[in-house]
Image (cartoon, coloured by chain):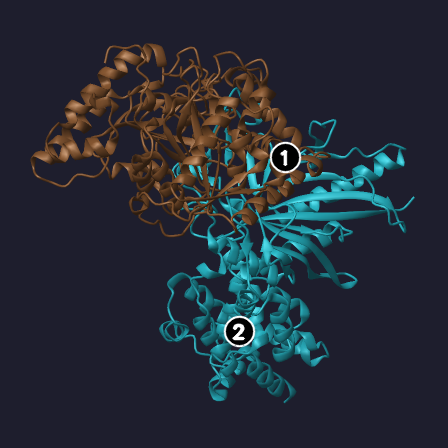
Amino acid sequence: MKLYAKPAHELHEMLLKKEVSAAEITKDVLARMDETEDKVHAYITETREAAIQAAAAADEKLARGERIAYFEGIPGAIKDNICTKGIKTTCASRMLENFIPPYDATVMKHLAAENPVILGKLNMDEFAMGGSTENSAFHDTRNPWNTECVPGGSSGGSAASVAAGSAVWALGSDTGGSIRQPASFCGVVGMKPTYGRVSRYGLVAFASSLDQIGPVTRDVTDAAHLLQVIAGHDEYDSTSSASEVPDYAEALREDVKGLKIGVPKEYFVKGMDAEVEESVRAAIKKFESLGADVQEISLPHTEYAISVYYLIAPAEAATNLERYDGVSYGARVDGADVVEMMTKTRSEKFGEEVKRRILIGNYALSAGYYDAYYLKALKVRRLIKEDYDKAFRTVDVIVAPTAPTPAYKIGEMTNDPLKMYLQDVYTVPLNLAGLPGISLPCGYSQAKMPIGLQIIGKPLDEATVLRAAYTYEQSQTFCREMADMGVKA
Amino acid sequence: MKYEAVIGLEIHSELKTNTKIFCGCATTFGAEQNTHVCPVCLGLPGVLPVINRRVVEFAIKAGLALNCTINKFSKFDRKNYYYPDLPKNFQTSQYDLPIAEHGYVDIETEEGKKRIRITRIHMEEDAGKLVHSGATIKDSAASNVDYNRTGVPLIEIVSEPDMRTPQEARAYMEKIKSILEYIDVSNCRMEEGNLRADLNVSLRPAGTDTLGTKAEMKNINSFKAVEDALTYEIERQEEVLEDGGHIVQETRTWDPARGITLSMRTKETAQDYRYMPEPDLVPIITTDEEIQSYKDGLPELPDARQARLEKDYGLSSYDAGIITSSRDMAEYFDAVIAEGADAKLAANWMMGDLSKNLNQEGKTIAESPVDAKRLGSMIRLIEKGTISSKIGKEVFKTMWESGDDPEKIIKDKGLVQITDTKELESVVDGVIAANPKPVADFKSGNKKAIGALVGQVMKATQGKANPQLVNQLLAKKLAE
């Protein structure tokens, strides 16, 4: 198996045993990038020079016999809405086409302590708004399993690069499913932590009460370790949790005996995709055979989750995106006066979906409509959260599909934004309730497109989620399979 | 038709915390442009605010000093509007759950004490400053933004429309300034923009209680301008109404050079700020214990202090009002009294020579070269009769210039008052002999003529003769 196809923990072992050098690993992943990028287009910005230097530095440390960190010398990439000091951070938007942040996001500071190899910044839906990465202002990203299909979104680049082998690990962000759904579509592992578990400082805000940064990896072990690196309280983020971060590696054991698993009856409805249902039900059966105690639960307000999400997220986004007005950040369309400059800049530099959501958001917040829409949505959000609180009194984790279908074709949903919004039905509730959730592969469609299983946990109980995920993962081979992409390995 | 003016004020005061409301940048005035900035107060993509607890403390203290109820559960909201001096194009402010509500201050009016109610006090961040390339915004091809001021903490104090005259509005603002200085939450330096007011004024037929349409004047930053702008605007509105016209609800600017208010472009609809709870900040929870602790820590406030000075020292209401109008002045007074000086003399010297010299040199009382101790000593010397008050003026002037103690100055300049009767008698004899005409005038019934003789004695003694003794001796000698 090629180096680019191995998970980080295996590469780390090989480095320690001096079976391979960091330079060789990076070279191999860069070669894979060369082979796949003209089909996958996962990257917006590549930072090869710095990557090669970082690999060399890791090798020097190893040569001196010094200890290296888990991700030291291992190549990964960062979603382009996470601020990286001195490296362009575009959010896949013309508005930030040339924005170079003068500061690092907190997660980048955490990562820096690991001395990883950063290969570049990854493509996404513009300002994280979308479920297919088709809303990127620059180019599409394609699904490595079938390059006519979408990789999912908004962290499409993160999932596609890890799936293609042009990154061993990646960071994504998740506001309504943007890590989990692309992970599901691309057959990799993606996790959204509990709201507040990971600092949002430096994550370009989409919806402040919903956004979280999380790991996208080859397997659950890597996800646990990457989460360990980025999690923790941040004094720069007032919404970050002060709760102690447990040792997630301890969660990586095969043990679900007696684990109570809830299956929401509202999630399995007549007419749902048969292949998705089959794979997910098979996974549930697997859990039972491993000793878990599976029970049906009810989440009665499920049907309102999309509406609630598509009122709260756009409202917060509308205010978060007001700062993009042509005054700063380099993108400016001149006008006769400042109002015209702002209007023209925003009209021309924002894409359609961004503008759509800003309009929805402002409508929901406007005088005369605030109570009926935004305030009402906040109240129903509470009810959705209470559904989970109630369920978690009787179960430890909840399982569900991640996405209602496998990856669809490029262009299939772009004419029907509402249809695309409905794709988020299994993922948005977690963001509304602030819960942790992981997606990992649990099967394939007939067309050999990956299907993802979602495991949802109690607030700050990533450990149990990881344990359930690890146990399931070890019982099958889906995670060890990679798209061959028709490229000579 | 007789109209009644109805006036409300929204006062913005910068809080004197060391750092800004949501980040660690310095708040000091006058720094080089764009040097007190960081990603957070620049509103760069990805940044988040973190509340400066000192801001909350100061806001609560202001609420308590202004007799408000403190809301134990309070939160921030985004107030959304576009302007280049506002980097995020929203201001983090407070909407429906402000930190304090339902307070009041009392002001002195011609009809006596009047209570002005305070609707609410809330915290918010200040915006930056636009620097236009031309003299005014209309003459400019471009503007630059100085972000030093973005994120400086403000409290906004909103009054009920309880004021009826420009003088009441001025008195209200002066009272607010005084109280905020007393509790040390603001520097209130209006020339630095620490304290600004938005004025709202409408007219209604006297005796009715429905509010008329109001006009608003924003960012008035001097007491004089408050009074002048309101005076003009009330007259303007009266004229419009007398002519049968309607007042347009609008924002007007005050042009101090021309002494008029001008309409700014009227919008068809009122600005919709689309207030939204700030999701990046958690609510502010304050306990009863904390509130009590802040209350206990408040100093004696101006009204209480004034009352005490009137009661304990018999100062007039006017004098006590001036002395307590600023905390520095009130504490200076206390220190002068602590030297054993008489309260009324202390008040006179402070309101007289001290204030005159401070004003001439543009100094605050805290910068006075004559400290309270020295002034107190000097007053004691006058009381003891060591020097006359006239000589005191000279001593004061020298203290101001040299910083020396009054005792040293008196000694060096030989200014000790002459109270030796024998010494004065010989001078008096000499003056009587040398001035026959005033003597004759006095003796023939013009009692005022003694003044000229007193003057001559003072001249002969370089002003050091004790004036009362001189009068006595002259009277005695002339009666012989």
Q: Position of residue B227 (x, y in %)?
A: 69, 47
Res. B191 in view:
yes
**Residue A489 in the figure: left or right of residue B248:** left
Label 2 packing within 10 angstroms: few (<14), some (14-19), many (20+): some
Res A432 → quadrant: top right
**Residue A233 in the figure: left or right of residue B298:** left
Chain containing the residue with disc 1: A
Residue position for label 2: B389
Q: For the view shown, which residue lies furthest in the left direction? A: A64
Res A4 → quadrant: top left
Residue position for label 1: A304
Residues under numbered marks 2 and 1 in contact, where contact means CB atoms less than 8 Å apart:
no
Q: Colour of chain B?
A: cyan
Work out whether A488 lies above or below A237.
Answer: above
Kindly identify the amino acid type of the residue bearing the numbered disc 2: Ser
Looking at the rendered structure, the secondary structure element under dot 2 is: helix
**Front position among marks 2 and 1:** 1
